[in-house]
Image (tube, helix red, strand yellow):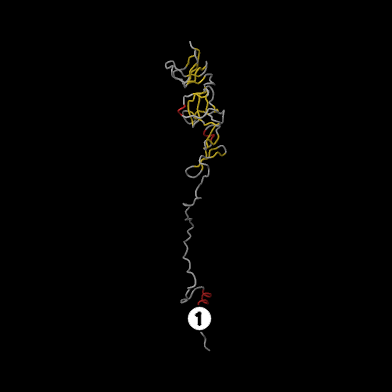
Amino acid sequence: MTRSALPLSLLCAAAALLVGSTLAGCADSGSSPPPPPGPTDTGLDTTSDTNDPDSGPTCDLPQGGACIDDDVHICNNQGGVTVTDCDEIFPDSFCRIRSSAAVCVVAEGEVCVVPNPDGPGNLFASCDGTNPGCSDPLDDDPVCKSGLGTCTTSQINSCRFGELIVGCLAGQPRTWDCTTMGGDCSNQRCIDLPEGAPCDVRANNPTAGRLRCATGLTCDIAASAQRGRCVVGD
């Protein structure tokens, strides 16, 4: 009895089932080559987020910032948010959007100038309200007042509504309230100030000064003082 040899294809198939590998001489022409070995897992994250638009901190606030809980929130150069506590900048101040920017302001009728606790000079606040400014009667606290209009530095020493503009802070006038002092504003000065009102005219330079007493009064001012008082003349 003659036995015919099994076809090579059947032998290769049987060997693959039993041995789990391909015998020599068995071609694997019909299958895809095995994939290359993968990289060794070192346990380290080697991916980069350099081109990932969602990587790192982001800030989606408006360009001029936002008011949140009465504090100023502004995007910083690192893509995060810088928060300013207004009350730490100036007493009783809070956040308002002015000219598309979040700023710290104080309310109308509130004090707008205080001594600088960290050094010489004073701190000046921006005011809330309609065309507000910081109005100083000199004998009382300077307070925020609406209706003073806007200003430029070229308008310093000009009169407006009976007040003398002595400064301009971010478009808001700082004024001396000549009317509240009992006088008027004219020719870059508070004039016709009554007895007891503040003055700054010195006998050795009578044409200088911006606080001038009414006719019949003189300015009693010490040599080292910034201001004196209007008194009845001799």
Name the residue furthest left. 204
Corner quadrant of residue 93 = top right
The percent coordinates of residue 72 (x first, y second) are 53, 38
User: Which type of secondary structure does the marked residue at label 1 adopt?
Assistant: loop
Q: Is residue 94 above or below residue 138?
A: below
Name the residue furthest top. 234
At label 1, the amino acid type is Pro
The percent coordinates of residue 86 (x first, y second) are 53, 35
**Which residue matches tag 1?**
7
Number of numbered discs overlaid on the protein picture: 1
Between 175 and 33, the one lying in front of the other is 175
**Badge 1, how many Cα within 10 Å: few under 14, some, many 20+?**
few
Q: Is residue 172 above or below residue 81?
A: above
The percent coordinates of residue 48 (x first, y second) are 47, 54
Between 14 and 30, the one lying in front of the other is 30
Could you tell me which residue is drawn at 50 percent across and 81 percent down?
Answer: 7
Q: Is residue 189 above or below residue 118?
A: above
The percent coordinates of residue 130 (x first, y second) are 55, 31
